[in-house]
Amino acid sequence: MKFSQKKTKNAAVTAIIVSAAMLLSKFFGMLRDILIAYLYGTESVNAIAFSTASRIPLLFFDIALGTAVTAAFIPIYNEFLQKGEREKAQDFSNKFITLVSIVTLVMVTVGIAFSGTVVRIIAGGLDGEKLSLASGLVKILFPAIFITGVAYCLVGILQSDGEFVIPALISLVSNAFLILYIIIFGDKFGVWGIAVSMLIGWILQIVIQIPPLVKMKYRLKIKNPFGDENIKRVCLLALPIIVSAWVQPINTMININLASGLSGGAAVPALDYANKLYIILVGVFTYTITNLTFPSLSRYAAAHDMESFAETVRKSVKYVIFIIAPVMAGFMLLSTPIISVFYERGAFDASSTRLTSTALFFYSIGMVGFGINEVMNKSFYALQDGKTPMRASVAGICVNIALSVSAVVFVKTGLEGLAFAASVAANIIGFGLLILLSRRVKNIFTKDLFASAVKSIISAVVMCAVVIFVKNALPFANKYLQLFVPAVSGAVVYVVMCVILKSEEFFGILKTVMRKFLKEA
């Protein structure tokens, strides 16, 4: 109990710090994308080849390992910590890191050797110079699979020991390095230089985590993982987790494959930019919530404290809906000015804006489902149940494949059909898992959960009405005012509605922030 209290005592303050760190990291990621879009737009050979190549290595990582690196590792690592067996915890983690390193290095070797074949499979619509350039870039970027695998392992160790800030900053470091490179060199060394600097940035994700590991006296060692019973346990837990996490990378793979034949391949970077902007806004809040609650959920599950487990899940879902509902509405209503403000400059012209804003609109439909899916996955993983998310993900993948192929091949809708299919799949999986968890854990669906969701939805609907009115009433064509005036008006109305409806989540955040500032004052 003391261990749990120590871990959760400053959770609210930590949440604010981690949220700020992740916001800063996502801001740098957005700035990186803006600079690359400025250099290459969406229709150039460099844009199409780089957008394709930069996604393939991590796509393979997500399919082969992905969230299983932390989701399967943390519960078992926490078991040792709860028992006070820190030496055994370190021994287990070193064996796990060694295993992940072996698997990822094999993937890197095969990927580099068959880079051309890999690109042709993933992006069948590319040919000629686009295909040749993408294949070359993939060879440079494929080592990211190994680097990311090790970095994720270290994140799991730090988070289990209560260190959340440094893991939240790893993306900032890699993005900052790439931004600095572009500012100094621009397109001097072409897209090849950007690919190399991106790889170096990924290496820095490991480097930044070494100081806190040294501080906690963690010793990284190569250990033989084969034959270890705990490694067998983590592998058995990881397998269904890996399959359940396939939905996002397979959705991405399908989108790249089908999009590579749309608009001369320009649909690939358009979908990429829209998806990244989508992930930045949704991810910063969703991942903050899940990263902070997952260790607690794991401890509650290990202690069979299902009442606290259910309460934590409910709060997570309520905050996801409270935060994402207005963001989703805003992205749908203001998709064109959002893309115009963030990306439309340099090689990224009005044509690129039209393509990307269309993708953003349809991606936004799946925001709430995406957020709930993240919470549900971590909830089931904490229960050491990877099979249920796996089944839900398989169902979502099937829906996405059917809708994507139908949209592009038969209905011929274009890239909007691909984004819509991904959103439908995300909603089916997210809400489906929520229903399944409620059947296993009591008191998930309670009156306060429904009341909270209704308040958030009503507030978002009123906000939409105001945004539409302000947007249509604006007498000027300035793209910045077209975005910020309706957005600020909508945000103010959402806050006012939350006050009127006495939103528990709004006042909870307000009280936490006020306590933090008063304490510092």
Image (cartoon, rainbow, N blue to C red):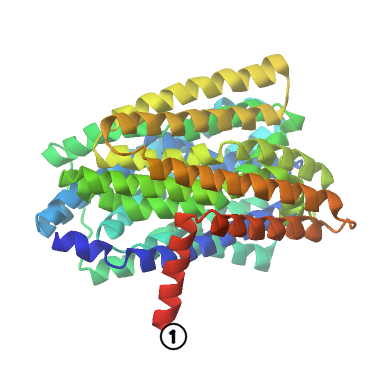
Say left or right for 11 vs 86: right
Say left or right for 259 vs 505: right
Residue visible at 30% across and 53% down in the picture:
156
Q: Nearer the viewer, residue 411 or 92?
A: 411
- Residue 382: x percent and y percent? 26, 42
Residue visible at 68% across and 42% down in the picture:
332
Residue sitting at the far top: 410
Q: Nearer the viewer, residue 203 or 42?
A: 42
- Residue 359: x percent and y percent? 68, 37
Q: Is residue 273 visible?
A: no
Residue 365 figure quarter: top right
- Residue 139: x percent and y percent? 52, 42
| SS assignment at label 1 | loop
On screen, residue 85 above or below 123:
below
Residue visible at 71% across and 51% down in the picture:
37
Q: Nearer the viewer, residue 468 or 334?
A: 468
